[in-house]
Image (spheres, grey):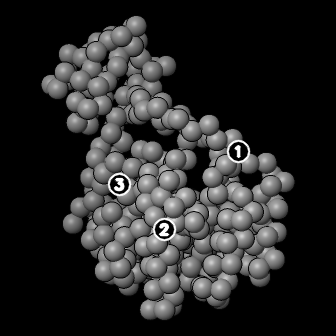
Amino acid sequence: MRGRIFNIQRYSIHDGPGIRTTVFLKGCPLRCLWCQNPEGISPKNELFFNKERCTGCGRCVETCEKKAITITDSVARTDRKLCIGCGKCVEVCPNEARQIVGKEVSVEEVVEVVKKDRIFYERSGGGVTLSGGEPLMQPIFVQKLLERCKLDGIHTTLDTSGFASWDTLKEVLKYTDLILYDFKCMDPEKHRVFTGVSNELILENVRRITSEFSTPIWARIPIIPGYNDDIENIRATASFLTKVLKDRVERVNLLPYHRLGEVKYERLERENTSTISEPPEEQILEIKAIFESFGLQAYVGG
């Protein structure tokens, strides 16, 4: 059983309790306008290109069998429609300006990395977290990976948008100790505009989780200025969590938008049309207070 990942981050403290190893899987069915991991959207390997390191030597042009690379203004440019992510240009680049994002791995290969930090999990209450992209885009691989980690006594966490069939989700949840569930916007039409999909399936799935599983849930809410940070949406989200999910939500993690992901669009040679600013700290504290007024434990980050 093999899957495709784009990163394994060890010693993480932001994706569940304790010290964790977060495995980022490639592929996502959503197209959030504020996506901060654009390299996780496509299920295929992709090229990262750092133009500041490129000297225009042309070695990548010579080695590309698809003729996807040309030199323009002394910088190598890649036609992304022709590029297949084979990585041959990476091998010949003398300046390390090119990098392939995406790697096919087996369940055992990932588990071997995860197990290296078992002592930290045991001392801190940590474990492994599967994130993305959207892990449920690779359901069988994810299921086998979580099952294998649980057999080794490692705490398992699934970080998901919830946008998947119930049949897919319920099989994965059999091996999940904690769910990090994203709530981006409560209005279904706005959700469609902002992410490319309605939230109807997402909300129905979390309702079914609460009725058919006892797995704890942490609500994760990105705070995106101009999209979902209005008081109406914040109160609607808090109301849903308290009235519909009741006591199943252990905590609410508020995730303020940051601009650190913008460089990734440049390296994918993809236009980033968003002009989002980071929310001020005062606004985040006001939003936190609203969730707390509904009796929820709210935290900034995590």
* Front position among marks 3 and 2: 2
Which mark is drawn over residue 27?
3
Identify which residue is drawn at 48% across, 58% down: 192
Query: Which mark is on residue 217?
Result: none
Q: Considering the numbered disc 2 on the image, is that residue within a helix, a strand or a loop?
A: loop
Residue visible at 65% across and 71% down? Answer: 237
Q: Which residue is mark 2?
A: 199
In primary-sequence order, the first of circles 3 and 1 is: 3
The answer to whether 258 is drawn above or below residue 223 in the figure is above
Q: CA distance from mark 3 to mark 1?
A: 26 Å
Q: Residue furthest top?
A: 73
Residue 130 vs residue 106: left or right?
A: right
Image quadrant in which the N terminus is located: bottom left
Q: Earlier in the sequence, mark 1 or mark 2?
A: 2
For the question of whether residue 13 can be seen, the reply is: no
Label 1 to label 2, Cα distance in Å? 24 Å
Assign the C terminus to one quadrant of the image: bottom right
For label 1, the residue is: 278
Amino acid of disc 2: Asn
Q: Nearer the viewer, residue 189 or 30?
A: 189
Amino acid on which the number 1 mark rests in the picture: Glu
